[in-house]
Amino acid sequence: MSTTQPNPLDDPAADPFEIAAMAAAEITLITGVARHDIALTLGSGWAKAADLIGDTTATIPATEISGFSAPALAGHVGSLRSILLPNGKRALVIGARTHYYENHGVRRVVHSVRTAAAAGARVMVLTNGAGGIRKSWTPGTPVLISDHINLTGDSPLEGATFIDLTDLYSARLREIARGVDPSLDEGVYVQNRGPHYETPAEVQMAKAIGGHIVGMSTALEAIAARQSGMEVLGLSLITNLAAGIQKTPLSHGEVIDAGRTAEPVISALLAKIVAEL
């Protein structure tokens, strides 16, 4: 899809699932792969995992596929990769994440997830870089997401669509991850609208309502994955302690630096987890 053309998801009369099916068909045509079994969205600090999980057989600029947008955030590569895993399964790696704060609408935020489902993926791995509320989580710590609190005030579900989120973040997949690394801790992810970082008072509110991790992605994508019948594994890289817990000012540069430092370790960890899925 050309960046000069209007995005079909911006038409309120369009069916987002039909556009996802169209995107999946385009991916099949370009890659020659009829079905992808697993999909991964690689957030800040996680991108190198794509080089470790298997053999890349096709790389596609995301903007060539219907409904996808160019990523606005440094640290996201803007491509889709088809990877042959050692066990013979196929992974679709999404390096083009549309964030809610870009104000493109929720349909674009979750389009990659819906496309992955339409391409056949039954497991969705969502990763991100985020702020930690627990003081024991130093920058560079990977954490499993056990649940989330969606503070965007929005949802990818449209109309009278009711989806149970009781076990949204798969206990089975988290157990597999802990089998690879028993030291993995877990916590509740709180998605805020962004793009500003939380205030210290907002961080304390997140803590009071049960949150342990604060960020600007993942929750809306996870809801869309559940709607599409996918099993979800969520992982956060703690890039910094959240505002008020960390005593120095927050910056995106700090997030990028922490991700770059942790990338070899967490990417190797994720590759080992994917091998077990």
Image (cartoon, rainbow, N blue to C red):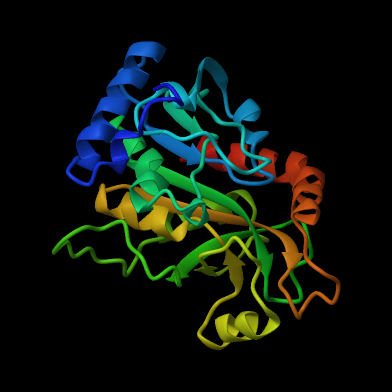
Q: Quadrant of residue 198?
A: bottom right
Q: Residue at x 47, y 45 (%)?
A: 125
| 6 lies above or below 255 | above
- Percent across and percent down for residue 265 are 75, 44
Q: Residue at x 60, y 45 (%)?
A: 43
- Percent across and percent down for residue 253 are 79, 51
Which of 97/143 is in front? 97
Which of 98/24 is in front? 98
Quarter of the picture holding the N terminus: top left
Q: Going by the picture, which residue comes out furthest to the bottom?
A: 208
- Percent across and percent down for residue 181 are 64, 53
- Percent across and percent down for residue 206 are 56, 80
Residue 180 shown left or right of residue 245 in the figure: left
Residue 167 shown left or right of residue 212 in the figure: left
| 71 lies above or below 245 | above
Residue 21 shown left or right of residue 68 in the figure: left
Q: Residue at x 25, y 58 (%)?
A: 157
Residue 49 in view: yes
Q: Residue at x 55, y 35 (%)?
A: 95
